[in-house]
Amino acid sequence: MSSNEVIAALMSVLGEDIVSLGEGIAERRTEDWSGLRGEVPLALARPRSVAQVSEIMSICNHHRQPVVVQGGLTGLAGGACTSRGDIALSLERMNAIGAVDTISGTVTVEAGATLEAVQQAAEAAGLMFALDLGARGSCTIGGNLATNAGGVRVIRYGMAREHVLDVEAVLADGSVIGGLHRMVKNNTGYDLRNLMIGSEGTLGVITRAVLRLRPRPGAVATAWCGLADYAAVTRLLECAQRDLEAGVSAFEVMWPSFVDYVTGSVAGLRRPLGSRHGYYVLLEATGSQACAHQERFEGFLATMLENGVIENAAIAQSRADAQMFWRVRDSTADFPVTLPGLVAFDVSFSIADIGAAAQLCEREVSATWPGSIVLAYGHLGDGNLHLIVHVADADAQTVEDIEVLVYGIVRDFGGSVSAEHGIGAKKRDVLDHTRSADEIAAMHSIKRALDPFGVLNPRKVLPG
Ligand SMILES: Cc1cc2nc3c(=O)[nH]c(=O)nc-3n(C[C@H](O)[C@H](O)[C@H](O)COP(=O)(O)OP(=O)(O)OC[C@H]3O[C@@H](n4cnc5c(N)ncnc54)[C@H](O)[C@@H]3O)c2cc1C
């Protein structure tokens, strides 16, 4: 069937309030933060209700029309980028946040609500939505769940899927699944909620979710530590997890090249420590009572210093100090501006392997492209390494060669080519570095069963 027929059907059922064409969409972004180029789609649908999402999918499925779901377009894998013949389905108008249920510790939200708005709603009710990442002001709950986002608190609270009790989603044929249950225990057959989470818009359109809230910690202590070598970093992690009773809530590791680069290139950032070290760790631990917690935290760091695990530490004495440490870590949002054409990697290894794997990547890249910039940092407690490679004036072949080199090292170490950003359009060709042929075949079977005509986010996630 022609694109004219599908547009006519959408217009007649939903009208131009919901479906925009031509100039109405030409100015819109067609791509996410991945650096991949998008094209202006055939049409943009901005439904206001689950029923309208269902109508849109039913019509598109009938006409075999490709649909790309879009949230806040902050994704880093190209999953939300559109091609010319696609229909973009944006959840931006479905952003309502329901009343917080303080007894069950839940809130039911529409998928277009931003992460930050949900965090604020939880905080206003005296609770916390513990998922957190740098794009919080723009990314949406739908995008967070569709990518199973991680972020800076995974070590304590887990990935996005750990924050969800139920998900409502519209399947390719327009049917609606998910009862928006608010209980933790629900062992009733296949776990459709977890099938939708992490499926990057290829199995269904997430429309609403019941999110799990946590008690807000009474106290947060933060320190910036300098360490000599990778063995000391893993020792600090081990001791912190054992000795900080209330728990480590962030363990962010930065290699010296990263700290030198961002403090030298991003305005207003300064080094938290005057001394130089082989590694830097931003350590955060939560507790219940402010004074006692801070005392215990400082006592722990003093022991680490005495035992030679850390060489030096700056302990935040105020919220402003802690924010200053976090600004160094979060300055990655400036990379696309300061390092245009960069190649970014979000990979994972066993914690024991990260030091050696990062060193090998750095050595091989520098040897192959002298003068290149390699910056390493990561959520080490989760085995997650982020690597930024910048080669001046890199052409498409150079970018491909950099990817082949780094993903080859990931495969050789038995790591994952995507720790938290997803596969999207960017990493389909290297999915087999981490997943076996049988696993990929099983994924194709699931896709065919739920979306037999392949209308949801074609050319994303699965190879071929
Ligand atoms: C500065 C910055 C920092 C970041 N930090 C982190 C981090 O620490 N950890 C991390 O994991 N990610 C991080 N990201 C990546 C990004 O923010 C996350 O992937 C986020 O979850 C994407 O949400 P979004 O609403 O922008 O989704 P989009 O980019 O719009 O879409 C992402 C994918 O989800 C699909 N999708 C979107 N909404 C829906 C829906 N309602 N139903 C079904 N599919 C849908 C899209 O089709 C696409 O495949 C960061 C990004 C930036 C720019």
Image (cartoon, rainbow, N blue to C red):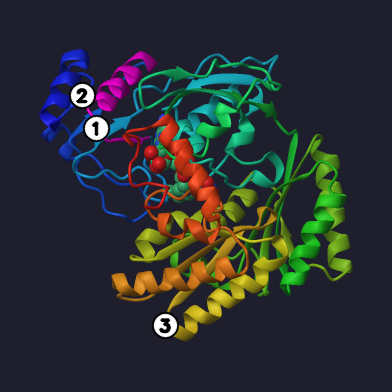
Determine if the C-beta at disc 2 is less than 8 A from ligand 1: no
**Residue in front for this viewpoint, 1 or 77:** 1
Residue 351 picture location, percent across and down: 70, 61
Q: Is residue 166 above or below residue 43?
A: above
Q: For mark 1, what is the residue? A: 65
**Is residue 292 left or right of 365 when viewed as pictured?**
right
Amino acid at the residue labelled 2: Val
Q: For mark 3, what is the residue? A: 369
Q: For mark 2, what is the residue? A: 19
For residue 413, what is the image quadrant?
bottom right
- Mark 1 lies on a secondary structure that is loop
- Looking at the image, is mark 1 or mark 2 nearer the viewer? 1
Mark closer to the chain start, 3 or 1: 1
Residue 54 counted in the magenta span: yes
**Is residue 347 left or right of 113 when viewed as pictured?**
right
- Looking at the image, is mark 3 or mark 1 nearer the viewer? 1
Q: Is residue 138 visible?
A: no
- Mark 3 lies on a secondary structure that is loop
Amino acid at the residue labelled 1: Gln
Residue 36 counted in the magenta span: no
Q: Is most of the magenta stretch helix, strand or loop?
A: helix
Could you tell me which residue is drawn at 18 percent across and 40 percent down?
A: 27
